Amino acid sequence: MLQCNCHIVGDPQTREAIVIDPGDDAGRILEVIKRHHLKVTAIVVTHTHIDHVVGLHRVQEATGAPVYLHADDLGLYRMLDVQASWLGWKTPEQAHIDQLVREGDVIRWGSCEAQILHTPGHTPGSICLYMPSDMPDAPLNATAAKSFQRGTARLFAGDTLFAGSIGRTDLWGGSFAGIMSSLKGKLLELPDDTIVYPGHGETTTIGKERATNPFLARN
Ligand SMILES: [Zn+2]
Ligand SMILES: [Zn+2]
């Protein structure tokens, strides 16, 4: 319902993959994993708003992969029942949190790696995943081929940065000063051609947001 983007990033050679934000539709996520013969080695949650974690328990159960998130979002995860009641949803089953990540941690799978950037503001434990460059050769499918160019850095931004906007900060634990400092101090430090995959909406680049995003343009 809230149209959260789930990303599955696989190494075409080793077939190892990570799943970022299994927000819902666990069946569809598992189908994609199966169709591409992927072995999921980690499930990473950019933050624990309910629309990013509804599918978490089922994807974890089916893949046996460890779940990674930032400790500062554990409080919000424990409030899943409250979040569910705001939306009139059924409380999703809780997943087991295997690994707490922090700024500078690196997650590796196949020949890929992603650095954890702690970007508080939208929530206290919001993180982004930064893949500096050089994904393996073959994109997994035609959709991926359109945006996955070799040698380009990528950022999985959760709800910190969107095409033309930024994450809201009026929910539990949000901080406008915090998100602005995360954006200016961390995300705008990345190269302009970094492809940004936000938690909702269209793909963009750091350069485009630097130039046109009304929240950042004055920077
Ligand atoms: Zn959110
Ligand atoms: Zn969201």
Image: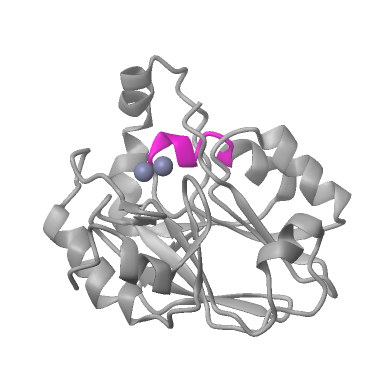
Residue at 47%, 17% (x, y): give it. 90
Relative placement, left or right, of 162 versus 174 is: right
When asked about the image quadrant of residue 128, the answer is bottom left
Residue at 58%, 34% (x, y): give it. 24
Q: Which residues are magenta?
A: 49-56
Residue 69 locus on image (x, y percent): 43, 57
When asked about the image quadrant of residue 216, the answer is bottom left
Relative placement, left or right, of 112 versus 206 is: right
Between 31 and 93, the one nearer to me in the picture: 31
Check the image and report above or below for 16 versus 160. below
Check the image and report above or below for 101 versus 122. below
Q: Residue furthest top?
A: 88
**Quarter of the image where ligand 1 sits:** top left
Residue 133 locus on image (x, y percent): 59, 83
Residue 153 locus on image (x, y percent): 55, 79
Work out whether residue 213 can be spotted.
yes
Does the magenta segment cover residue 103?
Answer: no
Residue 13 locus on image (x, y percent): 85, 75
Work out whether residue 118 can be spotted.
no
Does the magenta segment cover residue 53?
Answer: yes
Q: Residue furthest front?
A: 212
Between 125 and 134, the one nearer to me in the picture: 134
Check the image and report above or below for 129 versus 136. above
Q: Residue furthest left?
A: 177
